[in-house]
Image (cartoon, rainbow, N blue to C red):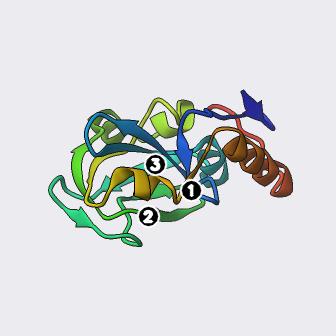
Amino acid sequence: MDCNGCEFHPDLYYDDEYQVWLRREPGDILTVGMTDLSQAIAGKILHVRVRRPGSRRPPGKPVATIESGKWAGPVPNFVDCTILEINEAVMATPALLNQDPFGAWIARVAVHEPLDAALRRFVTGEAARAGYCARAERDDIHCGRE
């Protein structure tokens, strides 16, 4: 499923600006990634810096920082969590986020609040698809692979 050529997965959770996706893992663990919309806006990703495993990240404190040829900024964080694991493949080859934004996750985090309550802050399913497509159209974002 896509919007303006941007890949979308209805089974994931998204922030309301569609910058990050979250996948629920067994236990109170989330996998965090960058959406296709975000990688298209950023352009070719040159560097990814993820906070060290064991680092606690309260809401509002980023999980990672992304740098591209035209942009540098945080990977937003909306939950109280601790970094458990970093995707070493993305660290070695940041352009994987451009090539496969839904396969090339950034980090796995342990959530320090009830996971169901935390996930209620995000959108998923048809509501997420509608918002994702609206953002792609509103901001004239067209996705492609590097």
x, y percent for residue 94: 42, 41
**Label 1: how many residues lie within 10 Å, few (<14), some (14-19) or many (20+)?**
many
Q: State the residue at coordinates (49%, 39%).
A: 97
User: Does 55 appear above or below 12?
Assistant: below
Residue 6 falls in image quadrant: top right
**Label 2: how many residues lie within 10 Å, few (<14), some (14-19) or many (20+)?**
some
Give the labeled residue for mark 2. 78
Quick check: can you spot residue 62?
yes
In this rendering, position of residue 86 left or right of residue 16: left
102 or 144: which is nearer to us? 102
Q: Quick one: SS at disc 3?
A: strand
What label does residue 15 carry, if any? 1
Quick one: label 2 or label 1, which is nearer the N terminus? 1
Give the labeled residue for mark 3. 46
Q: How many marks?
A: 3
What label does residue 84 carry, if any? none
Tag 1: amino acid: Asp
Tag 3: amino acid: Leu
User: Does 113 appear above or below 40?
Assistant: below
User: Does 29 appear above or below 10?
Assistant: below
x, y percent for residue 98: 55, 38
Q: CA distance from mark 2 to mark 3?
A: 24 Å
125 or 37: which is nearer to us? 125
